[in-house]
Image: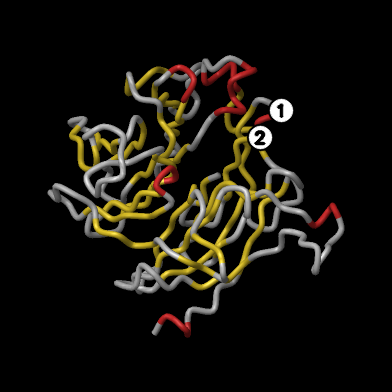
């Protein structure tokens, strides 16, 4: 999923082997690119880990099975391999045009393919990752990484040799578990999506051990909900107005939340 500055929502519609866009208020989507145009095998489009869309409509797609990033230019007949030899799990495009790609326990920045985070093999050290997932890059080029295997989120200021802990510890009586999504608001609060629980938690700046559960709806013995309400969120994004979006794979939908940030002050 990707949300641009005009509120247009782009979605990787895996089972239909395509990427579609939804204009604000639309009741149906419009085809942007098919797996054939992107030159990705149909049975692999469901494994597209992440993608971003530039202001001119150019799309950069994580093609994880083939260890590459593909670029698709609007009106082109097909996509092209763009960055090679990385098992891309997350991708982020900044306002000034830098493309950040996570995978293989590191984050690189294009152009230049500079390693800006990790790159020291898998492990628990703050200069390492163990299963990189989604990433976020703020206006100061600080890279936030969902370090899933280490059950934490870390941030890497530009030029840093190791990360700084952002989120790790006990949340709502449970430990932070396998974070796969991360976004940061303008006040520096970090929002984390966990694999399996589908919980979304908020972590105030410089307080990595005291997260707050802000969204959770997984059924429990004491709080059952209908099966149709069961969610499996696997991606998290903010739009330009600060609304939070999540992909709910099980119910084939995109959820939008208006977040009360008063507690972040």
Which numbered circle lies on residue 238?
A: none
Query: Which quadrant holds residue 91?
Result: top left
Query: Which quadrant holds residue 19?
Result: top right
Q: Which residue is label 1 attached to?
A: 16
Left or right for 14, reference 143:
right
Residue 23 spot, x, y in % from top left: 63, 50
Residue 8 spot, x, y in % from top left: 56, 51
Q: Which residue is label 2 attached to?
A: 13
Query: Residue at image x 71%, y 63%?
Result: 217
Residue 99 spot, x, y in % from top left: 30, 39
Under circle 1, the secondary element is helix
Q: Quadrant of the N terminus?
A: top right
Left or right for 144, reference 134:
left
Front position in the image: 141 or 172: 172
Residues packed near mark 1 inside 10 Å, few (<14), some (14 to 19) or many (20 plus): few
Residue 88 spot, x, y in % from top left: 41, 30
In space, the residues marked 1 and 2 are separated at their CA atoms by 6 Å
């Amino acid at each position: 999923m990707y949300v641009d500055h005009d509120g247009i929502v782009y979605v990787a519609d895996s089972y239909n082997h395509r990427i579609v866009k939804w204009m604000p208020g639309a009741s149906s989507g419009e085809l942007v690119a098919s797996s054939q145009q992107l030159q990705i095998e149909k049975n692999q489009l469901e494994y597209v880990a992440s993608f971003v869309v530039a202001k001119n409509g150019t799309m950069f797609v994580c093609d994880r099975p083939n260890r590459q990033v593909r670029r698709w230019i609007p009106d082109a007949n097909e996509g092209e391999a763009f960055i090679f030899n990385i098992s891309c799990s997350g991708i982020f495009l900044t306002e000034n045009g830098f493309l950040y790609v996570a995978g293989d326990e590191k984050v690189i920045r294009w152009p230049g393919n500079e390693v800006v985070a990790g790159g020291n093999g898998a492990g628990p050290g703050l200069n390492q990752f163990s299963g990189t997932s989604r990433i976020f890059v703020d206006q100061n080029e600080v890279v936030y990484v969902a370090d899933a295997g280490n059950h934490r989120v870390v941030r890497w200021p530009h030029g840093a040799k190791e990360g700084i802990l952002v989120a790790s510890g006990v949340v709502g009586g449970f430990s932070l578990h396998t974070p796969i999504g991360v976004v940061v608001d303008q006040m520096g609060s970090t929002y984390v999506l966990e694999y399996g629980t589908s919980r979304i938690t908020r972590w105030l700046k410089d307080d990595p051990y005291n997260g707050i559960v802000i969204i959770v709806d997984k059924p429990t013995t004491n709080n059952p909900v209908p099966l149709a309400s069961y969610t499996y969120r696997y991606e998290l994004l903010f739009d330009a107005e600060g609304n939070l979006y999540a992909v709910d794979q099980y119910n084939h939908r995109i959820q939008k939340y208006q977040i009360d940030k008063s507690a972040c002050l």
